[in-house]
Image (tube, helix red, strand yellow):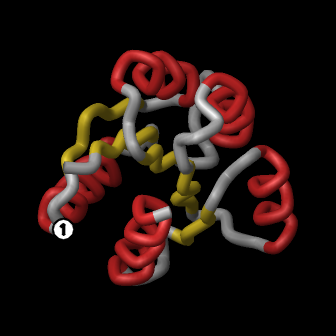
């Protein structure tokens, strides 16, 4: 079973993602509410995928992604954010994000992206 780490400062988003992931056969191995905690948990848990928010306290998603890719380059990172624009997409890709999905997109879009990242 594939293990996913959720890093988002919004408890409701984390809970909703956990439910969606579990309903689709994936295990949530951990949750974090900021980028720094996400890095710590990723190092402890070695997830198969990290779902990362952009706007978080302590350390934002782009900063966390850069550090995660330095420490664990093989783990795919999906940025799940409210702020989807072409400039952000460029910055996210430069930081090492493998996929950017808008929180406004349908759950099916998110599921397809996760399936693609976990199959790679």
Give whichever of 10, 31 is nearer the camera: 31
Horizontal side of residue 63 vs 73, given as left or right: right
Asked if 77 appears above or below 63 in the picture, the reply is below
Residue visible at 29% across and 32% down? 30
Q: Tag 1: Cα neighbours inside 10 Å, few (<14), some, or many (≥20)? A: few
In this view, the residue in front, 83 or 43, is 43
Note whether residue 49 is visible: yes
Asked if one can make out residue 60 in the rendered structure from this viewpoint, the answer is no
Q: Is residue 31 left or right of residue 105?
A: left
In the structure shown, which secondary structural element does the residue marked by tag 1 occupy?
loop
Image coordinates of residue 38 in percent, x first then y, are 48, 27
Instruction: Tally the marks.
Output: 1
Decide: is 86 above or below 10.
below
116 to 4, vertically: above or below: below
Residue 97, above or below 73: below
Q: Which one is in front, 104 or 36?
A: 36
The residue positioned 67% from the left and 52% from the top of the image is 97
Residue bearing mark 1: 24
Left or right placement of residue 10 versus residue 56 in this view: left
Q: Determine the residue positioned at 78% across, 45% down.
A: 95
Residue 89 drawn at (x, y percent):
77, 65
Looking at the rendering, which quadrant does residue 62 occupy?
top right
């Amino acid at each position: 079973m594939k293990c996913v780490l959720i890093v988002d400062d919004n408890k409701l988003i984390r809970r909703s993602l956990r439910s969606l992931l579990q309903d689709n056969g994936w295990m949530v191995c951990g949750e974090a509410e900021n980028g720094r905690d996400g890095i710590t948990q990723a190092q402890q848990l070695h997830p198969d995928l990290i779902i990362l928010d952009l706007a978080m306290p302590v350390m934002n998603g782009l900063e966390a992604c850069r550090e995660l890719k330095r420490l664990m380059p093989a783990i795919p990172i999906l940025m799940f954010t409210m702020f989807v624009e072409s400039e952000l997409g460029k910055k996210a890709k430069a930081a090492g994000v493998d996929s950017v999905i808008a929180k406004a997109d349908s759950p099916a879009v998110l599921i397809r992206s996760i399936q693609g990242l976990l199959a790679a």
